[in-house]
Structure formats: C-alpha cells, structure tokens
C-alpha cells in the first residue's frame, strides 16, 4: 500500500531542453495518478530522474560568431556587428569579450541594439553595459526570437570615449543558441 503526496520534480527541462526559471519546474499536476511510497520516517523521496517535456525532435547547440569590431581614434564611437546563421537559430546566451590596448582605451562599452532581422530584442531604448554579457557572467539567459537561416542578427555597440591615436578597444560578440539542425 502506498500514499500519494504532492511533490515536485526538480531539475526539469523546458521546451528547448535547457534548465530554466522556477516556472519550468514540474509540479504534481504532471504526476497525476502516481503513487509515491513514503520513506520510513514519513518523508516523500526526491525523484532523481529528469523529465523532458514533449518536443519535436532533438535540439542542437551552436555558437554563432560575429565579426570583431575595433574602436579606434578614427572608427567613431558606434559600430555594428552582424552575423547570419546558416540554419534557423534561437539565441539563448550572449557573450561579449573586450580587449583594450593602450592607456586611452578606457571608454565604457555598451550594447545599444540587438536585432533579429529588423525586430529589436531589447525591451526599451536604454543601453546595456557590455559587461553584463562578460564571458564569466551568470544569469544572463536570453530568449531571442527565432532567426530564419540567412537572416542577420545584429549587435550595435558603442563606446563612451574613443581611444586616442594608436590605442584600441576590440569587441568580440558570440551568441550561443539552439537549432533543430545537427551541426556538421
């Protein structure tokens, strides 16, 4: 004889097979009709197996590289980097590497726009510091719109101060995302 108790499956996967926020946890409604035996001390055991929600086929993870943009004394203070994936692609995490050369390469680097095709993916017109997307940043998950193959994803960058003569700031964005197409 067993008793049913309200339990939650921790570590559940979302539609893309990625760990998500608290709303991605599976509650007892997914366990309807299951009997869960009590342990000797009356506690409910933790279910260790992960459940995957129904989806259409497997997801594959891709890094999407962008051209390196270099701020110099003659480049201006705004540059744009665009990359077009070869497959339908959904961006999930942006990483921005910044390399500074010279004593005058001190300007704040910001992202002013993030476009999938012509659709802006930012919730307002305010800029975002590129440090938010540093390679070692945490909790920077994105949920960009699907980008059809051969359509550009554009990252607009700016610096608060252009470097002096001979100095530079190199900015290298990379977007990690998913596709249903297997990498070759």
Image: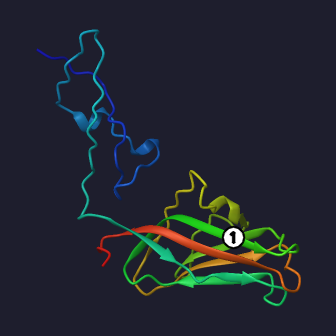
Residue 46, how many percent across, how many down? 30, 27
Residue 164 image position (x, y, % from top left): 89, 82
In the rendered image, which quarter contains the C terminus? bottom left
Along the line of sight, which residue is nearer the eye, 29 or 76? 76
In-front residue for pair 81/5 = 81
What residue do we see at 80% from left, 68% from top? 108
Whether 74 is drawn above or below 34: the answer is below
Q: For this view, does 120 lie left or right of residue 92?
A: right
Where residue 151 appears, as percent x and y from the top left, is 46, 85
Q: Is residue 76 left or right of residue 99?
A: right
Residue sitting farthest toward the left = 1
Mark 1 burial class by Cα count in 10 Å: few <14, some 14-19, many 20+: some
Q: Residue furthest top?
A: 41
Q: Is residue 33 left or right of residue 175?
A: left
Q: How is the image coloured?
A: rainbow
**Residue that carries the numbered disc 1 in the rendered image:** 98
Quarter residue 49 falls in: top left
Looking at the picture, how far across and down is residue 156, in whole percent? 67, 78
In this view, 67 is above or below 17: below
**Quarter occupied by the N terminus:** top left
């Amino acid at each position: 004889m067993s008793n049913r108790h309200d339990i939650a499956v921790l570590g559940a996967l979302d539609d893309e097979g990625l760990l998500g926020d608290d709303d991605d946890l599976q509650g007892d409604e997914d366990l309807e009709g299951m009997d869960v035996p009590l342990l000797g001390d009356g506690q409910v055991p933790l279910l260790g197996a992960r459940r995957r929600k129904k989806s259409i086929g497997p997801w594959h993870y891709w890094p999407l590289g962008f051209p390196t943009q270099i701020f110099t004394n003659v480049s201006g203070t705004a540059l744009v980097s665009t990359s077009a994936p070869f497959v339908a692609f959904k961006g999930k995490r942006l990483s921005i590497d910044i390399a500074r050369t010279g004593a005058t390469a001190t300007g704040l680097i910001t992202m002013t726009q993030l476009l999938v095709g012509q659709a802006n993916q930012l919730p307002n017109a305010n800029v975002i510091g590129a440090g938010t997307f540093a390679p070692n940043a945490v909790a920077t998950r994105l949920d960009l719109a699907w980008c059809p193959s051969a359509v550009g994803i554009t990252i607009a960058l700016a610096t608060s101060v252009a470097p002096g003569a001979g100095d530079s700031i190199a900015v290298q964005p990379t977007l990690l995302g998913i596709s249903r197409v297997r990498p070759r």
